[in-house]
Image (cartoon, rainbow, N blue to C red):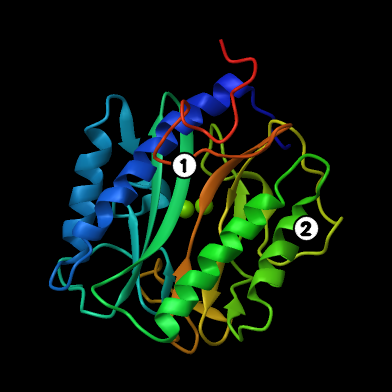
Amino acid sequence: MINLRTATEMDTIAHAGSIIGKLFEEMPTHVQPGVSTAEIDRFAEDFIVGHDGATAAFKGLYGFPGSVCISVNEEVVHGIPSEHRILDQGDIVSIDVGVMMDGWYSDSARTFAVGEVKGVATTLMAVTEEALAASIEAAVPGNHVGDIGAAVMKAVDGTGYGIIRELVGHGVGRDLHEEPQVPNIGRVGHGPLLREGMVLAIEPMLSAGTPRIKTLEDGWTVITADRSLSAHFEHTVGITKDGPRILTSAEGPVGAATPASGAG
Ligand code: MG
Ligand code: MG
């Protein structure tokens, strides 16, 4: 079943999501050469729980050992924070964060550069972020889930980068992962109809090489099969009659792109 949310419920998700947006604004000063991913994880958890009623939603979820997922270079998603993983100049680091507040989830990810990055790392991050923006634009009532994946494909077309197909976006709400699945490939007009009130995590994941992935022996870390670089950008997005509403921006409910009609 695909859940539909009221504008007030979206406000609550946007409140939780704004903590992630603010956390990401702070991240560049912490994502630095010589810093361990465990240090970043501690900073993220402290930042989240410093907001009344907020918890790091990934901590312990399905048994995940960290507070947030931190995936370096060829790691696509679900990287486990570690004291032994020290960031180097030129690395790229995907940080995926869930915040739970008042029983509602929000989910967002960004890839950060460690110091100065160049070449493929820079363009891979830029194309992935553009693919997210383009796919969010497709998240309007009357479109279909396939339009979102089609927008990712169009944004990536001609770059030579791979779209990770085995991992998908998803509905977000009372659970972190709800229906529908939101693949990063698709055909315009195909898949479930997008309706006002749906809340979706849209999250293109790209690789600089093969789109094939494998999971490391730790049972969590997903890497590209050819160990090429990977980038990941994600927002939780509400489908509204006024257009897509990003629920994981730092501004929160007040500064959201569209007014919360009906919110009292
Ligand atoms: Mg996520
Ligand atoms: Mg997600």
Q: Residue furthest top?
A: 264
Dot 1 crowding, Cα within 10 Å, few <14, some 14–19, many 20+: many
Locate residue 108 relative to residue 160 in the image: left or right: left
- Residue for point 83% across, 60% down: 188
Locate residue 240 relative to residue 53 in the image: left or right: right
Q: Is residue 15 visible?
A: yes
Instruction: Say if 224 sits above or below 173 in the image.
Output: below
Dot 2 crowding, Cα within 10 Å, few <14, some 14–19, many 20+: many
Secondary structure beneath dot 2 equals helix
Q: Nearer the viewer, residue 225 or 217?
A: 225
- Residue for point 27% across, 80% down: 90
- The disc labelled 1 sits on which kind of residue? Thr
Locate residue 155 relative to residue 53 in the image: left or right: right
Q: Nearer the viewer, residue 62 or 187?
A: 187
Q: Position of residue 65 (x, y in %)?
A: 29, 55
Instruction: Say if 145 sits above or below 49 in the image.
Output: below
Q: Nearer the viewer, mark 1 or mark 2?
A: 1
Q: Residue furthest right?
A: 189
Q: Position of residue 246 (x, y in %)?
A: 55, 41
- The disc labelled 2 sits on which kind of residue? Gly
Quarter of the figure that contains the C terminus: top right
The residues tagged by marks 1 and 2 sit, at their Cα atoms, a distance apart of 22 Å
Look at mark 2 in the image and give the residue it sits on.
Answer: 146
Q: Which mark is residue 248?
A: 1
Q: Quadrant of residue 221?
A: bottom left
- Residue for point 44% across, 85% down: 120
Locate residue 236 relative to residue 87 in the image: left or right: right
Q: Position of residue 201 (x, y in %)?
A: 57, 48
